[in-house]
Image (cartoon, helix red, strand yellow):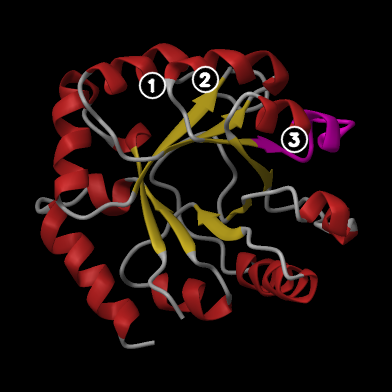
Amino acid sequence: MNQPVIAASILAADFGQLAHETKAVLDAGADYIHFDVMDFHFVPNLSFGPFICKTLRKHNIKAPIDVHLMVDNPQVYVEPFAQAGADLFTFHAEIVKNPSALVKKIKQSGMEAGLAFNPETSIDILNDTRLLKQLKMILIMSVHPGFSGQVFMPEALDKIKKVRKLIDNSQSNAYVAVDGGIKISNVKKVIQAGANFIVLGSGIFGTKDYTKTIDDLRKKLKKL
């Protein structure tokens, strides 16, 4: 198995030094920068939007940026994030009536598309193989979205296994991504369940040495 992608969620970074923090975590070995975009409606928190993405690009951040839209109307953010330089746009299955249409709009904008699922949400929509093959990422939430620093919900492991099976059976190339409460202590179980894209916020930014943290993650994963 190829080494999993490690994405650093800047929601947990020091916003007073955001460009510096982003560069530091990439220099430490992170593969992606992850945006948690919240509108205070879909989740009870307010974060940031395309302007931050555009600003990081102006500060010469060249790594892939994936944006996770926890908002009521994700479709209105497609063009702004595409123009700001985002690479992957993930929206929630709970909020969109016609996901195929939104996926098409995302891909036409030049970005890849992802579909996210809250802990209590069924993944039955992924039985549509045509939809599944259009997606770059299936994002399984292992916490209730809205805030950084929550504890990983072990029941997410069963959902990860089911998504991995669906992807393998359909011969899709989509990532099985997991977000929420992932740390060195539980990452092994997440990868063994079938994930190959892990999002860490406080699991990286809450540590004193980003390089050591990511190196320790890589070493642990190499043993699988």
What is the distance, in whole Å, between disc 2 and disc 1 at their CAs?
7 Å
Q: Secondary structure at mark 1?
A: helix
Task: Find out whether the residues at labels 1 and 3 contact each other: C-beta distance under 8 Å.
Answer: no
**Residue bearing the label numbered 3:** 103
Q: Is residue 135 magenta?
A: no
Location of the C terminus (image quadrant): bottom left
Residue 173 versus residue 2 in the image, above or below: above
Residue 187 appears in which quarter of the rendering?
Answer: bottom left
What is the distance, in whole Å, between disc 2 and disc 3 at their CAs?
14 Å
Disc on the earlier residue, 1 or 3: 1
Residue 31 versus residue 145 in the image, above or below: below
What is the x, y in percent for residue 214? 22, 61
What is the x, y in percent for residue 21? 17, 34
How many neighbours does mark 3 have within 10 angstroms: few (below 14), some (14-19), or many (20 or more)? many
Looking at the image, which residue is at 58% across and 24% down? 44
Q: Is residue 123 visible?
A: yes
Q: Which residues are magenta?
A: 91-102
In the rendered structure, the answer to whether residue 152 lies left or right of residue 209 reads right
Task: Find out whether the residues at labels 2 and 1 contact each other: C-beta distance under 8 Å.
Answer: yes
How many neighbours does mark 2 have within 10 angstroms: few (below 14), some (14-19), or many (20 or more)? many
Q: Amino acid at mark 2?
A: Phe
Task: Find out whether the residues at labels 2 and 3 contact each other: C-beta distance under 8 Å.
Answer: no
Disc on the earlier residue, 2 or 3: 2
Looking at the image, which residue is at 57% across and 59% down? 175
Q: Nearer the viewer, mark 1 or mark 3?
A: 3
Q: Amino acid at mark 3?
A: Val
Residue 171 versus residue 10 in the image, above or below: below
**Residue bearing the label numbered 1:** 53
Looking at the image, which residue is at 28% across and 79% down? 220
Q: Secondary structure at mark 2?
A: helix
